[in-house]
Image (tube, rainbow, N blue to C red):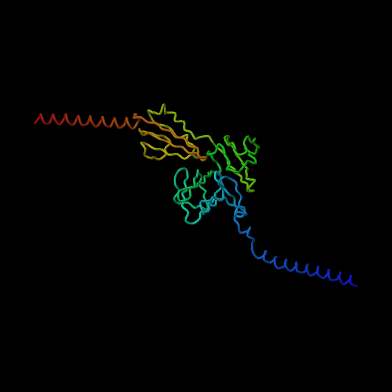
Amino acid sequence: MADEKGGMTVKKAISLMLCGAAMLLLLVSPARADGPTPADDDPAAHRVVIGSDTEFDTDERMFVYRVESSEVKTSFPSGFVSADPVSVVMPDGLVWRLYRDGVEQTDVNLSKIAESGKYVLLFGDLEQRSVKFTLVNDLTGMLTEYVLPEGFSLDSVTLDGEEQLLPSSYVADLSREGRYVVRYGSSKAGVSFQLSVTTDHTPPVLKLEAVENGYASGPVDISDRNSEDEITILLNEKPIDYEKELTKSGSYRITLRDPAGNVTEYSFVIGVYFNFNSFAFVFILVLAFAALAVYLVRSRRKLRIR
């Protein structure tokens, strides 16, 4: 009987201990469900360092650049090339400047930067930090290669649908013309990008058959200009409208820009020359002098007769 009572006492004690443990679990579990743990509040818990000065926020899917106590967040890493718009989140009070092709942009929507060009974003009171990126059109002549941002590596490159060899893991060769699809990513951040562009590196041209060594002795035909090319004509440094034939004497500077952004400039001089209008003007001038001479002769004769 004593053994049975002793066994009952041990079993009872164990049951009480198990009940107490269960109650403690019930007390702890709601606290964990109702609020985040300290690790959840720590931004570093979802930040991945992918470069010497670049972090990636895996929750917000944004790249982070620190300036003292402030953070600039971008939808792209520095060195990024894209045919799609990009966005920047700038903290209040932080001084910044944005340059496109070397020209400061004074009116820009940071949430959607879309115009093609090479950009430099400077931020901080002393412009301590910078982010560089390039935006291109779907058809572009700006790219002959793509050096990937720090921390990224190539997955594949295709040209007109054909897989290309990858001599380098971080440089995509875009020197040939055609349709490229460049796929790359960062294994640390678990993020990938794709750049799809058609490259055209052939500059626009004009024949300018009448121009030799920068000089033309008569009209210059520019009617072979491609209608898709943008043309700017300066005559003696003043803009003039496009005409298929340039006839005025003077110093010309012509700039052609094709849809891919390739630019060609021509400079030449059209010297003084005689055309039909010139001969007509000289003929009229000679007639005028002849008429004046006849008038003077007759006037003198009348004076002598009197």
Give the residue furthest to the right: 1
Q: Residue at x 44, y 47 (%)?
A: 104
Which quadrant of the figure contains the N terminus?
bottom right
In-image side of 131 versus 159 (left or right): left
In this view, the residue in front, 155 or 71, is: 71
In-image side of 16 versus 95 (left or right): right
In this view, the residue in front, 183 or 18, is: 18
With respect to residue 141, does 214 lie above or below? above
Residue 149: x, y in percent? 57, 43
In this view, the residue in front, 272 or 297, is: 272
State the image quarter where residue 8 is shown: bottom right
Residue 229: x, y in percent? 48, 39
Q: Residue at x 47, y 40 (%)?
A: 230
With respect to residue 173, does 4 lie above or below? below
Q: Residue at x 45, y 43 (%)?
A: 102
Give the residue furthest to the left: 306
Residue 120: x, y in percent? 49, 45
